[in-house]
Image (cartoon, coloured by chain):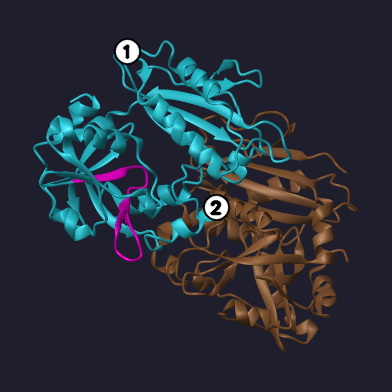
Chain colours: A brown, B cyan
Amino acid sequence: MSDRVVMVSGTDGVPRFVRPEEPLLRADDLGVLRGDGVFETLHVRGGEPFLLTEHLARMARSAARLELPLPAEDRVRDLALAACAGWPAAEEGALRLVCTRGPEDGGEPTLYATVAAVKAAVRTQRHEGIRVVTASLGMTADARGEAPWLLGGVKSLSYAANMAAGRWAAAQGVDDVLFVSADGHVLEGPTSTVVWRDGPALCTVPDTTGILPGTTAAHLLSRAGSAGLAAELRMAVPEELVAADGVWFCSSVRGIVPVTELDGKALTVDPVTAQLRDLLGYPG
Amino acid sequence: MSDRVVMVSGTDGVPRFVRPEEPLLRADDLGVLRGDGVFETLHVRGGEPFLLTEHLARMARSAARLELPLPAEDRVRDLALAACAGWPAAEEGALRLVCTRGPEDGGEPTLYATVAAVKAAVRTQRHEGIRVVTASLGMTADARGEAPWLLGGVKSLSYAANMAAGRWAAAQGVDDVLFVSADGHVLEGPTSTVVWRDGPALCTVPDTTGILPGTTAAHLLSRAGSAGLAAELRMAVPEELVAADGVWFCSSVRGIVPVTELDGKALTVDPVTAQLRDLLGYPG
């Protein structure tokens, strides 16, 4: 397993290496005081970040929504590439790009990247799948669209509730949570996009619900034709997922993970899973 | 204006001073990566933190809800006192206590404190009051009580939406937001508790709504009798606040700030305001 890499972008835009155990952020950085910043997580394969352009675009959209002056795309791209430079081609990595609002009393945003090896547990999940329970997000599916301050669609650093949902799932003896709206619609996982197959349709939830637009899921749906499927944005209730031909959680590091149980009901693993994983280029 | 003070609690429990500009947190601290931690903000007066015991108790409750191993109360108290030691008695200060879950791959929580001078704008607000608009929190008043993963009542570091609401208020040309539930009930401000007077009743919103239990508001209500008033927990709609004898936003640093306008409707500043401010011991 490779060492973790941390690169920070200097005010001159030149990335410099920081030892992982060396402190990087000030005590008054708004990233920690307020969870006020944006991030992206990317899969590193063959020593290169996967879907870098798409992730950079989403990061810029998140920053714009937070009125956060994210440095220019070239500078964030240079940082991502510098962080991955020398990462072993044979080893799967997870690249994080983080930009906080910086010190509370003003100054530059704090922009940095880390790379770490993908944990063995992730590879296990790809093969064995995950058991999931639904959990209410407390809001109707259209609530966030009408209230921009609720930050629907923004990948901010304020993930405490997402993490709490994960702990709650573990306490129920399952692997993950599927958030549902107060009016019963399927939304997303705390750190993943839900995708399902209904016959010839490969479906995910429309962004109008305030979910985070999934980069990996969007890429998968854009290639659905290669698997003889048609991409579709669709609202669904959990019962429709139980009745679907296949259900997966998609995220950049995990790739495509079959959901094998939803609220205690066993789901069949769709035989198309391996083909979809190959489409995305994740190791089998 | 005094310099900012930063103290960090070492693994031996002994607080040490860190220069404000010196980095303190690792790049992989879950406080920044996930907004995963708890905090408290206290008023420093006469060189001492106000309501320290109450804030320590709330911090411990927040940490328990996050399953975060906050160090023992004595250690957090020692840190708070060490941070305030030498703070000039004549100068109002804001003490922050922060505890994050620490580095992602394990290790101790990161516990630190900062003290800074209270900004002049805060003192202006106490005198001139603030103009406020309502903004939906997207959830019904009972949603968070039924869904512990939504972290109702927890003062976590995940405040990006609270900060976004503040920017949204500024864009509307007002000073702050009053969150209301999807079913129309008054909840709280992004960083304050709402208190109002209805004749002899000094009212605030019950914690069962998932609001953060306000330390300053609770202290004020516990002393309502000294002002000839009776403390009451009450559900209300914004129209009831417009019709109230007085409405205030309470928080530890601001103290008690009159709301002078709600959704464009002018509110009278209650003559009892100065008496309530004196009860809380904030400078007039």
Q: Where is residue A83 in the image (x, y as percent from the top left)?
A: 75, 44
Magenta span includes A115 = no
The amino acid type of the residue labelled 2 equals: Ala
Mark 1 element type: loop
Q: In which quarter of the image is the N terminus of chain B?
A: top left
The residue tagged 1 is B89
Amino acid type at mark 1: Ala
Q: Do tag 2 and tag 1 residues touch (Cβ < 8 Å)?
A: no
Pinpoint the chain carrying mark 1. Answer: B
- Whether the magenta-drawn stretch holds residue B182 is answered as yes
Range shown magenta: B178-196
The percent coordinates of residue A200 (x first, y second) are: 72, 89
Q: Mark 2 points at which residue?
A: A161
Residue at the (57%, 28%) spot, across then down:
B111
Front residue of this view, candidates A133 and A264: A264
Crowding near pointer 2: few (<14 within 10 Å), some, many (20+)? Answer: many
Q: Is residue B81 visible?
A: yes
Q: Alpha-carbon distance for marks 2 and 1?
A: 39 Å
| Residue B218 coordinates in the image, percent (x, y) | 30, 37
